[in-house]
């Protein structure tokens, strides 16, 4: 019987390939053995098509990307080994069917041909999130077509539905295997790509436990703020995989877990048995609602005011009056604020000012919450349907001080303002992925439209962060 025959989780560190690792791969022998076992399992299952879901292809905030070239190529040139080349036939029939079904479910897909890659300034090649697991697979088995999917920053429910679409496409057509490519936390130690966070180990333990216990609803309703703090790249791949697995009985086998380079690597095989169609949407919504209610209960007055301001504006088309719970401090102080809004762990809007423009803090928050939700040029305006899924933070800016030496800066403690003439760029402190002074300055200069070799002044400031 045709259908989904196997599913896997694979990490994708190029260093585990011996030519690239140059001996360092020996530190990941458990991961290597796990991938070899995956390759042997795929050889035994003999899928006609392998679907790989990766974080490192063309990533969109509002769409899942699928490559539509007839031939799919890739190499490890970016890692100093262009001689490691790979070539696969694209299963365009499956791509088309998935696209048609996703359209009916109103899930946005970006079909990536050569022109689309050029439009976005991307290379029309397979990324290492695909190539690393397939490097091991092709040592055992090559008689398959490939479907290359890059997850989008969509809601968990949309990713779940997309996984169900993949499974539905497999039924009755051909044998399909799915590889969910993704590393776990990148913050297990300071030797990793990001600075250490205790949230890294917490994230990894929870993900492994959820899959061991077949708790797909737990995966699909995972705390995306925790995932963000952990610096992972695999959760959304796992959510799509969970959508496909949810239609079957299955046995999970965690083959390995280790983090020798400060990044968590997990390998897993999911033995697919009988079909067992289920709809988890209600459970997922209920879990997400519970977590959002918990967040609401932990809001302070600043966050609550920002949230209620945007909700009132979206529902009534005008600014709210200052509510009774606002305290004397918020009514008496005049200070600049930035309001940040997130949706499912991703930024949804952020706007503020370096100097106060309203009569008091409360009015600043009311105003800039609306601006962040409706006027941030990077995003479309927030809709009424999105309001239940948004979380808010408010940064109150302390007075800025001119910087004489870069040694005075600390991107975790201080935000910066760069200025050249009338051009000005601001970056708040303690932003994920901004770990060095050089990164902080570069991003602020880019926001201001100031060249790195131009003359400019730097000021630093602290914030009181609510949320």
Image (cartoon, rainbow, N blue to C red):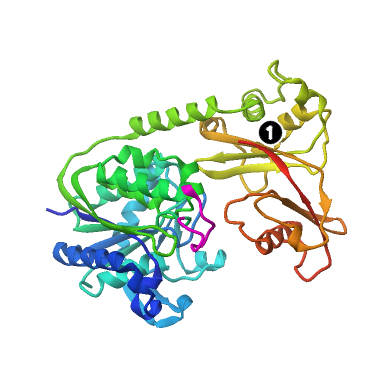
Note whether residue 436 is visible.
Answer: yes
Which residue lies at the image location 32% right of the left edge and 37% below the top edge?
Answer: 217
Q: Would residue 255 appear left or right of 225 to someone viewing this image?
A: left
Where does residue 153 sit, x and y in percent of width and height? 48, 49
Query: Which is more toward the observer, 359 or 317?
Result: 359
Query: Which is more toward the observer, 99 or 341?
Result: 341
Q: Would residue 71 appear left or right of 276 to someone viewing this image?
A: right
Q: Which residues are magenta?
A: 188-198
Residue furthest out toward the right: 421
Residue of label 1? 370
Which residue lies at the image location 49% right of the left edge and 53% below the top edge?
Answer: 231
Answer whether residue 193 is magenta in the image: yes
If the image is split into quadrants, where does the C terminus sit? top right
Which residue lies at the image location 48% right of the left edge and 62% below the top edge?
Answer: 192
Under tag 1, what secondary structure?
helix
Where does residue 403 sit, x and y in percent of width and height? 81, 57
- 237 in relation to 343, above or below: below
Q: Based on the displayed image, in which of its 4 quarters is residue 306 positioned?
A: top right
Note whether residue 71 is visible.
Answer: no
């Amino acid at each position: 019987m045709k259908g989904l025959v196997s599913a896997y989780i694979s990490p994708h560190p190029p260093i585990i390939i011996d030519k690239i690792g140059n001996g360092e791969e020996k530190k990941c022998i458990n991961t290597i053995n796990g991938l070899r076992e995956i390759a042997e399992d795929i050889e035994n299952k003999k899928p006609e098509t392998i679907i790989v879901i990766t974080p490192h292809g063309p990533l969109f905030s509002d769409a899942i990307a699928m490559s539509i070239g007839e031939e799919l190529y890739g190499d490890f040139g970016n890692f100093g080994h262009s001689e490691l080349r790979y070539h696969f036939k694209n299963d365009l029939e499956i791509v088309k069917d998935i696209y048609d079904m996703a359209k009916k479910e109103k899930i946005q897909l970006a079909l990536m041909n050569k022109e689309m890659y050029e439009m976005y300034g991307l290379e029309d090649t397979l990324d290492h999130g695909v190539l690393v697991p397939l490097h091991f697979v092709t040592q055992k088995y090559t008689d398959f077509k490939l479907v290359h999917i890059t997850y989008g920053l969509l809601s968990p429910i949309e990713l779940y539905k997309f996984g169900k679409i993949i499974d539905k496409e497999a039924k009755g057509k051909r044998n399909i295997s799915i590889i969910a490519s993704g590393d776990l936390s990148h913050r297990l130690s300071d030797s990793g790509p990001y600075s250490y966070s205790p949230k890294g180990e917490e994230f990894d333990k929870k993900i492994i436990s959820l899959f061991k216990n077949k708790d797909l609803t737990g995966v699909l309703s995972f705390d995306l703020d925790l995932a963000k703090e952990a610096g992972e790249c695999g959760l959304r791949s796992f959510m799509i995989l969970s959508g496909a697995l949810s239609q079957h009985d299955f046995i999970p086998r965690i083959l390995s877990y280790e983090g020798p380079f400060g990044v968590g690597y997990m390998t897993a095989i999911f033995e697919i048995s009988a079909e067992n169609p289920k709809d988890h949407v209600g459970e997922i919504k209920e879990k997400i609602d519970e977590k959002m209610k918990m967040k609401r209960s932990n809001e302070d007055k600043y966050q609550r005011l920002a949230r209620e301001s945007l909700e009132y504006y979206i529902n009534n088309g005008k600014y709210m009056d200052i509510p009774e719970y606002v305290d004397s401090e918020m009514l008496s102080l005049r200070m600049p604020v930035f309001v940040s809004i997130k949706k499912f762990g991703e930024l949804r809007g952020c706007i503020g000012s370096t100097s106060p423009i309203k009569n008091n803090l409360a009015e600043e928050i009311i105003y800039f919450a609306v601006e962040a939700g409706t006027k941030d040029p990077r995003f479309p305006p927030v809709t009424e349907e999105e309001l239940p899924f948004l979380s808010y933070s408010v940064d109150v800016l302390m007075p800025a001080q001119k910087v004489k030496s870069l040694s005075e800066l600390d991107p975790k403690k201080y935000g910066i303002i760069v200025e050249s003439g009338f051009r000005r760029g601001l970056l708040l402190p303690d932003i994920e992925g901004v770990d060095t002074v050089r990164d902080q300055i570069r991003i602020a200069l880019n926001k201001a439209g100031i060249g790195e070799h131009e003359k400019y002044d730097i000021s630093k400031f602290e914030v009181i962060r609510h949320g």
